[in-house]
Amino acid sequence: MQRITQVVELLEDKIHLVVKRYVLLKEENSILRRNLVELQQKLNIKEQLIQEQETDFDSLQHAKTIQGSDNKEKTTKKINILIQEIDKCIAQLSD
């Protein structure tokens, strides 16, 4: 009878340990999930900032190309290309 009591007590101890560990892991998981959401939001903000800076960079490159060109024909061609790109964008927005 004493052997059964010892086995039951040992089993109860192990169950308490498992439950305690489960609670701790559940809390840790919750913290990690919150951190993940926060980091994903920061990543989205950074990606948006990169996209804006790339757009600004492209605009500056176009402006520099036009400004730095001494050849009138070359400048006219570049302006025509930009106008075509704008027309394509407008057409896409119209659809």
Image (spheres, rainbow, N blue to C red):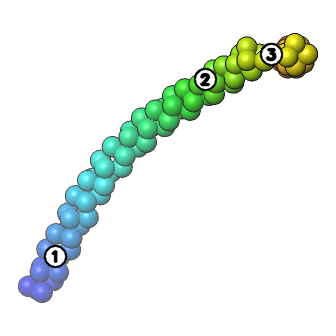
**Structural crowding at the residue carrying mark 1, measured as other residues with C-alpha within 10 Å and reported as few (<14), some (14–19) or many (≥20):** few
Q: Mark 3 points at which residue?
A: 70
Q: Where is residue 42 in the image (x, y as percent from the top left)?
A: 46, 32
Q: Name the residue under label 1.
A: 10
Dot in front, 1 or 3: 3
Q: Mark 2 points at which residue?
A: 52
Between residue 39 and residue 64, name the one nearer to us: 64
Residue at 12% in and 79% down: 5
Q: What residue type is labelled 2?
A: Glu
Q: Which amino acid does label 3 sit on?
A: Asp
Using the image, determine if residue 42 lies above or below residue 58.
below
Q: Upstream in the sequence, badge 2 or badge 3?
A: 2
Dot in front, 2 or 3: 3
Cα separation, mark 2 vs mark 3, equals 30 Å
Q: Position of residue 67 (x, y in %)?
A: 73, 14
Horizontal relation, residue 41 to residue 1: left or right: right
Between residue 39 and residue 86, name the one nearer to us: 86
Using the image, determine if residue 66 lies above or below residue 8.
above
**Structural crowding at the residue carrying mark 2, measured as other residues with C-alpha within 10 Å and reported as few (<14), some (14–19) or many (≥20):** few
Q: What is the quadrant of the C terminus in the image? A: top right
